[in-house]
Amino acid sequence: MIKVQDLHKSFGKLEVLKGISTTIENGEVVAIIGPSGSGKSTFLRCLNLLEQPTSGKILIGKDDVTDKKTNIMKVRENVGMVFQHFHLFPHMTVLQNVTYAPIKVKGLSKEEAEKHGLQLLEKVGLSEKANEYPNRLSGGQKQRVAIARALAMNPGVMLFDEPTSALDPEMVKEVLEVMKSLAHTGMTMAIVTHEMGFAREVADRVLFLDGGVLVEDAPPAEFFSSPKSERAREFLEKML
Amino acid sequence: MDLDFTAILPSLPYILKGIGVTLKIVLVAGLLGFAFGIILAIFKISKYKALNWFADVYTSIFRGTPLILQLMIIYYGAPQIIGVEISSYTAAVVSFSLNSAAYISEIIRAGILAVDKGQKEAAMALGVPGNRMMRDIILPQALKNILPALMNEFITLTKESAIVTVIAANDIMRRAYIVGGEQYRFFEPFIFAGLIYYLMVISLTVAGKAVERRMRQSD
């Protein structure tokens, strides 16, 4: 469970998040949408402290992430993250990308990590690419490897920061399919996305952010058919 | 014109023996300079102001004064401070490694900063601790990009090592000079010494290219 209380984040004088509170239950899939500059990526990046919140409280499970005494490294092991631009390690093969953190951070043996890693690559449909370097892969394949890499740590929560925004249109589907099947396994997921169709179909809840404020928090059916706020209506008109 | 290369033939083995001396200085100083350069580079990007300051002042001093001065201070001046004489070999290795560390640290710093910020974030998100991240993720990528610049630094070091002649280390340069003095023929032994340096640099270049090719496997 992720519990966010009155989260604020400023970059210098610019206040990007103006007090966001929400709860994401275990097994819930939450789509975070909103116009660019609304703070949705910053919100996601605060959850595993890639951005340090200015104030507010974030609980992941029992850990208070914002408490200085919490070992943030341990928390991050439990929170997988997938980035817009993949950020695979270019000097490692696909399998090394997937097994690196389990071996070096979790202390798994190479055999264990590779066995698990190959299973994950199988799951994302890329086991035959295990010994290739990332540069030989297409964008969609890279993103699927990145998902496998995050899953290799057996996280309880997965964060996705616009996972399909950097992809060619024909590759979006293969990544969304992987995410959809992941959602069906009961993974807790927070997804910043512009894929309205995906949000509507897969998400349990939609968070609509605008100007650093959580404007709407509703099930997708409700949000997409009858948004309460004027801002959400305008946004949806532009998107659909 | 009075040129007679046959006259120095008997002295060739003597000059060639200098290769070992030069190589020993360059290799040891190069490796020490590289190791110290990495440490200085990490100081430079550290969040601790004192470490930034130390590394910056260090670099500015060693880049801002002549190498030959540093060499002579260490060889002739240091005994006044530490109370014991040091060999010309030690003085050469110490001054060259201290000096090249300053240059190498700048190269490595630039290399580290050029690695995509996303790499650090991806490693952080996986819970990889800072020192591990530097060693396994950031440095390997940085080194690949800066290899040509590093190679350049080692080539410079190889050629600059000729100044150890002034502290009487028996390298290629000094041996050529001695042979010249004995025979009153300087042109021939110096040309020969120049040829040796040139061939060493060419071999370094070829070796560097080979390493670069290996490291570009993942491209």
Image (cartoon, coloured by chain):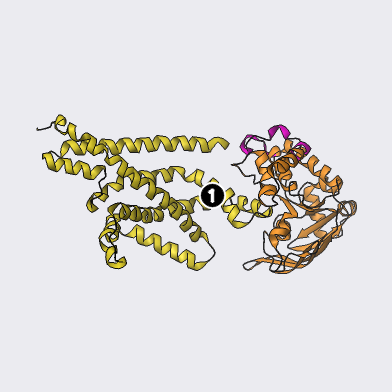
Res. B72 visible in picture: yes
The structure residue drawn at horizontal position 37% and vertical position 56%, both measured from the top left corner, is B98
Toward the left, the furthest residue is B1
Colour given to chain A in the rendered image: orange
| Label 1 chain ID | B
Horizontal and vertical percent position of residue B100: 38, 52
Horizontal and vertical percent position of residue B57: 40, 64
Q: Residue A220 or A175: which is nearer the viewer?
A: A175
Q: Is residue A58 left or right of residue B49?
A: right
The structure residue drawn at horizontal position 75% and vertical position 42%, both measured from the top left corner, is A116
Q: Residue A143 or B128: which is nearer the viewer?
A: B128
Res. A39 visible in picture: no
Q: SS of the residue at dot 1?
A: helix
Query: Which quadrant, please, contains the N terminus of chain A?
Result: bottom right
Tell me which chain appears yellow. B
Whether B47 is drawn above or below A204: the answer is: below
Q: Residue B140 or B36: which is nearer the viewer?
A: B36
Horizontal and vertical percent position of residue A216: 83, 60
Q: Amino acid at mark 1?
A: Leu
Read off the residue under disc 1.
B139
Magenta residues, start to end: A120-139
User: Does the stretch in magenta take in A154?
Assistant: no
